[in-house]
Image: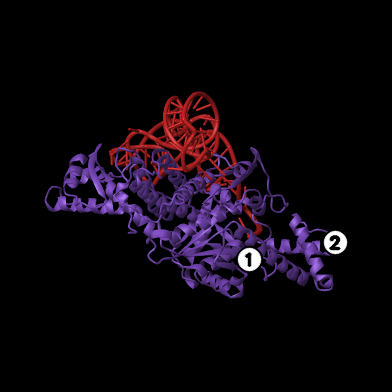
Amino acid sequence: MTTQLIRDQVADIIAAGLRAAQAEGALPEFELPPIVVERSRQSGHGDYASPTCLQLARQARMAPRDIALRVVERMAPAPFVGQVDVAGPGYINVTLSPAWLASLVLKILAAGARWGYLDLGAGQRVQVEYVSANPTGPITVASTRNAAIGDVLANVLEAAGYEVEREYYVNDAGSQIRHFGESVYALYLQALGENVPFPEDGYHGQYVADLGQELAQEFGDCYLRVDRREAIQALGGEGIDRMIAWIREDLLALGVSFDTWFHEQSLRQSGLFDRCLRRLREDGYIVERDGAVWFTSPELESDAVLVRSPAIIPELSERPTYLASDVAYVWNKLVERGFDRAIYIWGADHHGDVPRVKAATRALGLDPERIVLIIYQMVNLKRGGEDVRMSKRAGEFVTLRELLDEVGPDPIRFLLLTRTADSTMDFDLDLAVEQSDKNPVYYVQYAHARISSILRFAQERAWDVADPGDTSLLTHESELALIRKMLELQAVVALAAAQLAPHYLTFYAKELAAVFHSFYRDCRVVDEDQPELTRARLTLVRAARLTLAQALGLLGVSAPERM
RNA sequence: GCCCCCGUAGCUCAAUGGAUAGAGCGUCGGACUUCGAAUCCGCAGGUUGCGCGUUCGAAUCGCGCCGGGGGCGCCA
């Protein structure tokens, strides 16, 4: 199975036709623009449509239709082309050959677990950094959207042929960590019966109290005797470690895992942070004002960004501001580890930092195009149409763990990817739980289970489902529609990878399931009176099941054989 | 004050600058003695918030309004 998209092959033969027309003097000489070919939206317009001749009209000083006619005359035949038409104002419509489509079924099955995988990455190394929630509490719904987007995007990029690394950036420095440590320490003391006040900016969640209890039981009173600062460091660090373990476990239950857990602390321990800051200072990007250190750059509209302020962050051992670490981090990604591209998945609340990180990247002498920051909008959690309010510090939120207990990973992942990242989404707990036609994940999984059931049925009647039969018998309109949709998997992977938009996969999976269900209505698979056709159709549905499984696999959603 | 996202069918949302803007849900009406009815088929439903512009062509790009959501202005 070739990994070159059919759409691109169509573009190639149109380009060849154009050049041939020019060589023969049927068209004037001009430089060819990139040939636009897209999937036809309207049935009756073939499978692919190219509006290229429309845009050539001015240069060629000819009517677009005439250009198209002269090109089509000279287009070389190709095995996948069934019919070529000039339509409307000058579109070139290409219809795939039914025989070629039928032959595709065996190629899909032969590709197996690699079906849908492409070679667009050309060996490029891409890092996707996602979730990266502060390790001061459990994963919430907002971070779960981040996880779904990041994880599926990484899958898609891998399928498109990139070398992908998945990373979780652990913010284990900064004042939130200090507040957390102080909270844990206070609750530890309280658990031992000490009468101490709870810190003003402390964390109020039940899990912090539990953590204090836990530490009191395990360590006893030994931290009563050590210096407060030291105790906070030790107990806070222990708390953070347990939070990270907890986060890792919950994400794993969602089917999300990482190649690297990168600790912010390491940026300073390695000295990289200081080196980057020195570099920026030497190049004139650092100014000192009002007793604080600022990053400034001509491309930043708002003046300057705080790097360090003794008034806010008195202790040198603590990390400076958020941006300051990001400077060293981007250097680490692009230079020390040499990724060609670094993708960040950020919640909309961080959108203001995008120009800053871009500016800092440029200030370091790196190409800002190499970093891509995907901003996804917020998630409103709902239950029966009512908003569920959340605040991490106040300890009121719905966690990933609770979601998993209530809903399970499949609906969570699927539902979180049924919107573009740009739109705010409501996540209704009641709907997510509901196993009905309102919940699209079951619709797709049902198609997979239904095919599995057909294959079981055939096997029970002693059909050899591994016998491919003669796939050229697949000529029914609904059979061909199913194959066309299966073929589209490659284009969807390419599109999702190019746009960095994993939600295309969920829409595709639903469409594929729908086309299968329609096929099922029109064509009986197992028919004792037509053994040859039965063998061919068994092969067809095996390929359809594989394609569904590939799409679901990229989404990280299970493909059940029974439901 | 500045920034970001959204506005498309009754509802929730799609649509790599292309032809007649599509799905699901909801309403209504049909299809199981035959491989899974968690399914399918059909009907109805639209000035793509408004205006101007760019383009052969705009839901899509630009500018200006209107409406909704969110963020920033020494927390991360």
Mark seen at residue A374? none
Under mark 1, the amino acid is: Pro
Instruction: Give the number of the mark in front: 2 or 1.
Output: 2
Q: Pick the residue in front: A362 or A82.
A: A82
Q: Which residue is mark 2?
A: A196
> Which chain shows up in red?
B
Of callouts 2 and 1, the N-terminal one: 2
Are discs 2 and 1 located on one and the same chain? yes
Protein chain holding label 1: A
Q: Which residue is mark 1?
A: A320
Q: For the point 42% across and 38% down, which residue is it?
A: A521
Q: Chain of mark 2?
A: A
Q: A461 or A83, which is in the foreground? A: A461
Q: Is residue B27 left or right of residue A320?
A: left
Which kind of residue does numbered mark 2 sit on? Val
Q: Is residue A395 left or right of residue A257?
A: right
Regarding residue A488, the answer to whether it shows in the image is no
Q: Residue at x 65, y 38 (%)?
A: A384
Q: Quadrant of residue A84?
A: top left
Is A530 or A298 nearer to us in this picture? A530
